Image (cartoon, helix red, strand yellow):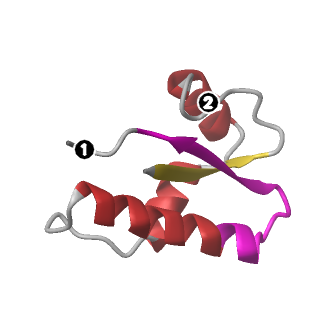
Amino acid sequence: MEVCFVTTLDNPYNYFDDFDNWYDFDTSHGYNTCQYVAGVTKTSGELSDRDRALAINQAVDDIVRINVTGNYVKVRKTIPDDV
């Protein structure tokens, strides 16, 4: 399954591999990307992990498409499907 998230062009850290540093950079620069994604994601605790990932991917696509700051890019990572 492919999971996606959004980051900013100036963030030197990898969201998937170095989240703590990525998050510190993101929040210290006032982007608050996790909160932005959470605010536009249409999800529920009732959804499966796969459906929740799809909802986040859709939100990321919307953010990158609108790209208010011109600084957002989509990052991807493939993870094994649940058995």
From the image, tell me which residue sits under label 2.
22
Mark 2–mark 1 Cα distance, whole angstroms, equals 26 Å
* 24 relative position to 55: left or right: right
Q: Nearer the viewer, residue 1 or 58?
A: 1
Quadrant of the drawing holding the C terminus: top left
**Given the current orientation, which residue lies at the most extreme front position?**
83
Dot 2 and dot 1 residues touching (CB under 8 Å): no
The span shown in magenta is 63-79
* Above or below for 65 versus 37: below
Mark 2: amino acid: Trp
- Write the residue at 31% across / 71% down: 43
Give yes or no for residue 78 being in the magenta stretch.
Answer: yes
- Write the residue at 58% across / 49% down: 32
- Residue 69 lies in quadrant: bottom right
Give the x, y percent position of residue 24.
59, 28
Sequence-first tag of 2 and 1: 2
Tag nearer the camera, 2 or 1: 1
* Above or below for 80 versus 67: above
Give the x, y percent position of residue 10.
83, 38
Give the x, y percent position of residue 35.
48, 56
* 81 relative position to 45: left or right: right
From the image, tell me which residue sits under label 1.
82
Give yes or no for residue 31 being in the magenta stretch.
Answer: no
Local packing at callout 2 (Cα closer than 10 Å; few below 14, some 14-19, many 20+) is some
**Given the current orientation, which residue lies at the most extreme left position?**
46
